[in-house]
Image (cartoon, rainbow, N blue to C red):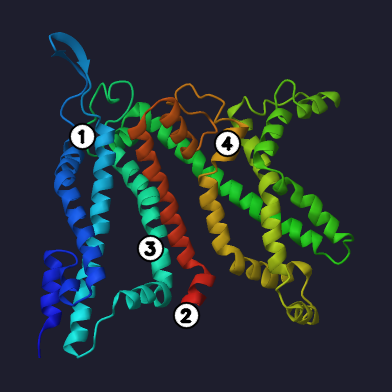
Amino acid sequence: MRQHRTIAAVLSAICMGLGQLYNRQWIKGILLLIVGVFSLYYFINNLGDAIWGMATLGDQGSHLAKVNGLTQMVAGDHSINLLIEGLITVMMLAVFLVGYYANIKNAYNAGKQRDMGIAPNNFKQTLNYIFEIKFAQSFLTLPAIGIMFFTIMPIIFMILLAFTNYSAPNNLPPANLVDWVGFKTFTNLVALKTWSHTFFGVLTWTIIWAVLATVTTYFGGVLVALLIQQKGIRFKGLWRVILIIPYAIPQLISLLVMRNMFNGQFGPINQYLRYFGMDGLPWLTDPFWAKVTVIIVNMWVGIPVSMLLVMSVLTTIPKDLYEAADVDGASGFQKFKIITLPMILFSTAPVLITQFAGNINNFNLIFLLTNGNPVVGDYQYAGATDLLVTWLYKLTLDQQRYNMASAIGIIIFLIIATFSIYNYRRTRSFKEEDMIQ
């Protein structure tokens, strides 16, 4: 038996398309050969420079040099551009290697067909196979490549920045080079007193905020949904519409309105308090009251979401369970504890976890309502209500401390991923789904 499969695979390993040409798949072979030649030409000319740029981040910044007898400022290596260009080239190499492997596998399979006495697919049959039989995989290829370059690559870039000294004022290209510093940024963040005090203070408030914001909105939504579903409540539809209005209005509008209402001196809320003989409160200027304010406003915005979710779950609970509980003489609280709450938690536990993760990164509410203020004197570029994500924003856009912001971003991801995966795997819905599968 002739070993066409082996010969075709070896030829394709030598150069893309040669195996297909050996299998007499002329059009496919020529197209793959063109792609392979151009790819090899690109990587021969660029891969070495890309690896050098990522490894060294350049060897000379902007400097004075004589050009045509005149001393001029000459642009040096731009470390960040070298890092980005290197990442792009490496990821293109990864895509190319996947395609190269597919090319070898395809040539091997076509050769195997020849060994069995079956003619390999011609170009028309290949197109039919790609766009008919393998339509889903073919259709998903372009989005997958887009995600790779526009989502995964920026994430990798951010992670790499955390291991450099890319920050103002002394390490901004093109005037200066950026260097690899290993874990020094993380060490400074948790050990250097000027940074660690801010980091642990903001981290503590972020966790407290996420817990309180999640618990208050979730159980507030449960309470409101149960009240609306009571038998004696009339105009249920009207109540639903009224309570959903805070969610229907864009947060940008709601939060800016709330910011004006809670204004310490001229805000309507303090004016009403003074009208009744009470002193106004420093809602947004005192660290404690600012934190209370963001929690209250978050309840206003977030309870309608939980209310809608819980109301949809309540409609799925069989009425027979409540009738059986009535026969057994169960009180309203007992029915809630034994029937309603477990059913709600079973259906909404994954959503509750995502709400907690979302509150850790609740940039909009903090930024639009307080901008992280009031200022704390011994914090590094952070205020009393700043979350890690808003502090990261300030470090990036306002202070250009890119390496420190990248390190904080990695820590945020580790916190959210660890909490979410651990708790999701402990939910009843996940365990029962696993048992069904």
Q: Which callout, 2 or 3, points to the residue nearer the camera?
A: 3
Q: Is residue 119 left or right of residue 397?
A: left
SS class, disc 1: loop
Asked whether disc 2 touches disc 4, contact meaning CB atoms under 8 Å apart, the reply is no
Mark 4 highlights which residue?
A: 366
Q: Which mark is residue 57?
A: 1
Residue type at mark 1 is Leu
Residue type at mark 3 is Thr
- Give the mark nearest the N terminus, 2 or 4: 4
Q: What residue appears at the point 26 percent right and 52 percent down from the top-left corner? A: 92
Asked whether disc 4 touches disc 1, contact meaning CB atoms under 8 Å apart, the reply is no
Query: Picture coordinates of residue 74 (x, y %)?
Result: 20, 18
Q: What residue appears at the point 84 percent right and 60 percent down from the top-left corner? A: 236
Residue type at mark 2 is Met
Mark 3 highlights which residue?
A: 141
SS class, disc 3: helix
